[in-house]
Amino acid sequence: MVKKALLVTVLAAFAVGGVSAESQGFLNLSAGGGVLFDRANVGHTHIEDPAGFAPGTLCVNLFHTGFGAWGFVDATFAELSIAVLGGPSRWDANIEGENLESGAFLALDIGLLGRFPIALPLPIGEGMNGYIFPLLGVGYSVVLMSNADNEFAPEDSATHLSTFRISLGVGYDLDLSDAMFLRGAVLANMSFSSRSFSDIMDDFGDGAHRLGFGPTVRIGVGFRL
């Protein structure tokens, strides 16, 4: 009985979402932009008995904390975004008595998200419609500049720190008028190690990459086209 009730609830939610999506129109285009915060684990690797170090496991991490601006274009079920962000970067390694030099980074980020909008009634006022939508997609962050100078940082090009990710989250649109809306989103990102961390294993010995995790928070204003 409980399973049937749960199934009915889920089907009802999708039915409401389908109606709300249909009311928006499949090719209801919009565009806009705003600001974002991003915290990314760009690389994470473990190396057993690394060359040039004491026996044991060498763990190396790189974190980027970025602030920037983003813009988007979308239809009802998909969103394409581009962002420019920068901020401090931090290298961590379990090397006793050594403080790795960190620095700053600048990146260009491109993302593609699928979404399924579900209408929500809002007791704010007439014409104040709201839409919540789950988000799932992919992205690629191209690192344009990184000024960290330590034995693990890439020597050839900052783009070796560029990463691919899978994103999962939730977004919300709040109508401000017939043509304008407020958009917010929170994403959880799973990042794959950058090329630079493969170079680290080539230099110091065999190891294993670990997936990195971090959040993205975005808020902006959109306009219906």
Image (cartoon, rainbow, N blue to C red):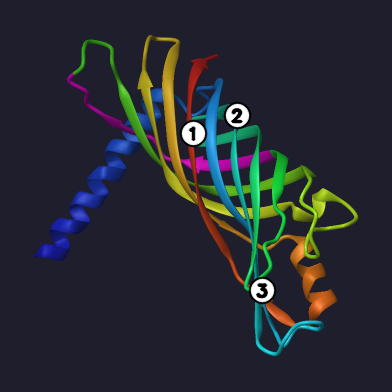
> Relative to 118, does residue 212 appear above or below in the rendering?
below
**155 over 204 or under it: above or below:** above
Which SS type dominates the magenta stretch? strand
The first of marks 2 and 1 along the sequence is 2
Give how far across and how far down residue 162 sits, in percent: 74, 51
Furthest-left residue in this view:
1
Verify whether residue 100 appears in magenta.
no
Q: Tell me the element at label 3.
A: loop
Q: Earlier in the sequence, mark 2 or mark 3?
A: 2
The image shows residue 179, relative to residue 90, as above or below, that is: above
Give the amino acid type for the residue marked by disc 3 in the picture: Ile
The crowd level at tag 1 (other Cα within 10 Å; few <14, some 14-19, many 20+) is some
Disc 3 versus disc 1: nearer the observer = 3
Tell me if mark 2 has few (under 14), some (14-19) or many (20+) residues whose alpha carbon lies within 10 angstroms of its own.
many
What's the mark number on residue 177? none
Point out the stretch of residues depicted in magenta.
Answer: 109-123
Q: Secondary structure at mark 2?
A: strand
Circles 2 and 1, Cβ within 8 Å, touching? The answer is yes
The answer to which quarter of the image holds residue 38 is top right
The answer for how far apart the CA atoms under marks 3 and 1 are is 36 Å
Residue located 21% across and 57% down the image: 7
| Amino acid type shown at disc 2 | Trp
Q: Amino acid at mark 1?
A: Arg
Which residue bears the numbered disc 1? Answer: 218
